[in-house]
Amino acid sequence: MMKSIIFSASIVLTAMSVAAQEIPATGDAYMAAQLATEDLNGTARYVAMGGAMDALGADLSTMGSNPAGIGLFRRSQAAVSFGFNSQEDGKSFADGTKTNASFDQAGFVFATRSGRHGFLNFGFNFHKSRNFDYVLSAVNRLSAVREDGTREYFGTQNSQSVFKDMNGVGEGSSMPYSQLDYLYYNNMSYTDGTFDEAGNFIGVEDVDYISDYGFDSYTFDRAHTGYIGEYDFNLSGNINNRVYLGLTVGLHSVHYKGFSEYYESLDADNPRPWYRDVLISDNHKITGYGYNIKAGIIFRPVEESPFRIGAAVHSPTFYKLTTDNYTTIGTDVDWSSASEDFRFNTPWRFNVSLGHTIGSTLALGAVYEYADYSTCDMRTIDGYSRDLYTDTEYENSSSDPAMKRQIEKSLKGVSTLKLGMEYKLDPTIAVRLGYNYVTTAYQESAVRDQTVSSPGVYYASTTDYTNWKDTHRFTCGMGFTFDQLRLDLAYQYQMRDGNFYPFMRHYSADYEVFDQQGQPTGQIETMTNDCQPVSVKDNRSQVVATLTYTF
């Protein structure tokens, strides 16, 4: 009953693998969220105050949040920051380790007087806007069963992909098969089909496939490493010490590496040893660059009061990226690989902020930021054109419509609240506290859908995903001033929970049954693929030290 189905799947799969090479690649909704998310990072003072310094200004890290904050500098300054990041419940796996050293920030600002009460300042700052270092581990059982208690689907992580297309349902006439599908079916199923001299298929004598019975379990480990580096160039100033304006051009560089191993126990009682278990290993890299523009304003509504209001807008970051993967499967270690270019645009960001100082001892800050992640745009590179007038070549790209709909279904707007305070015990010693609350980027029903007709699925070498919940960050720190030098220390504790899935949480589809000669029988059967979530945590600590020189 299943024999012609699986044979037909292998034929369609081979055709898809050839066609996909001509289709530009993009990522998916989960890659979009991973690349668009920003960490709380920068100078130790900025981190210790929870990043709530947009309206207070006069810190190099505000160059990347509210560029007008650099306009509050009255003296030139240079700073460099180092730190450590430690995952609370992590374990070492592959290149991923529980604790990692990090070079977090380096920058300077030149403050120049412009008129009697004004300043025109120039600055540069590097910081890690995203630190990918994280090790995820999950163990669970796969428990979807038929009425008679036996398994009716392939157990491994891409198994949901084969069934849908047998009916030609979905956005196209055929199911989008991924790299992993191709690798899996070339190794884990085979046919003893017969052909005539012209190579035409006559019939199927026998087909073997993964266990029809028993409960399977899996283990999953992935080591994420790398970072997104942001290089900001700033021009800012003030008008009569009441209105502060700033503009920042940011250049971003992406350096991501991920290595994962998915091991599934298929059937301990199977007499064929190669069907008792399977191991899928995947190496994945994302590299590239992007740019954005940020503009900000800070003003004091009451001339006699230090109370300040700020606002800033960040354009999308326009990325050009390359994704590389190398995937192996089974004890025979067959492999597949791909390297493709695509473009990705992050959402617009908007923030408003408040800042107030009481004398020279207490500073209070608050920031609210919003970014709609459902507007992330994965774009395919369609080719290149030449401008005959300027004799220059430029790249053409277009939005991936199928993945755009999937992103809109999976992601949503994210709100971030930042609160912070600084209290000076005396002119040379300051203590700081901060807090962040970041809402989840994922819809409650979000799923990494492997049935979407998109290059982001065709080139997929993994199917796992995690729906992370809200994030909480608690920060504190101290600052010590020695004439022109200042040493700042900060501690940050971040916590968030999530639900991990090795593949689509649920998929069910009807398929038409064929006989041994490949002819339809008129019967319709249903296949179901299901998995339950595993609760995972991302609780981590960060220690940052910044040395600042004022001149």
Image (cartoon, rainbow, N blue to C red):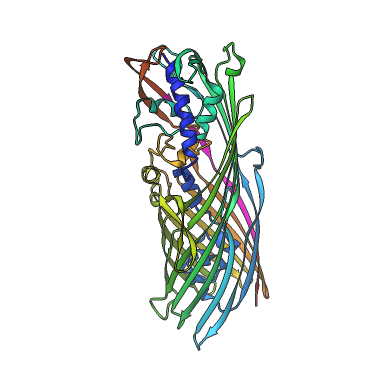
Say which residue appears at 55% left-offset and 49% top-offset.
322
Which residue is at the far front?
197
In the figure, 263 relative to 422: above or below?
above
Q: Which of 242 and 6 is in front in this view?
A: 6
Query: What residue is rendered at 43% in x and 25% in y?
Result: 529
- Quarter in which the C terminus is drawn: bottom right
Task: Evaluate whether residue 416 shows in this view.
Answer: yes
Question: Chief secondary structure of the magenta span?
Answer: strand
Vertical placement of residue 341 versus 196, above or below: below
- As drawn, the residue found furthest toward the bottom would be 116
Name the image quarter holding the N terminus.
top left
Q: Is residue 140 visible?
A: no
**Horizontal and vertical percent for residue 336?**
58, 34
Q: Nearer the viewer, residue 280 or 145?
A: 280
Q: What stretch is highlighted in magenta?
A: 529-545
Give the image location of residue 204, x and y in percent: 46, 14
Point out residue 36 in the picture as x, y percentages from the top left corner: 48, 52
Q: Where is residue 325 in the image (x, y as percent from the top left)?
A: 58, 40
* 337 or 392: nearer the viewer: 392
* Residue 8 falls left or right of residue 93: left
Residue at coordinates 40% horizontally, 39% vertically from top-left? 446
- In this rendering, is residue 194 above or below 38? above
In reply to whether residue 544 is colored magenta, the answer given is yes
Looking at the image, residue 433 sits to the left or right of residue 347; the answer is right
Q: In this view, does 470 lie above or below 157?
A: below
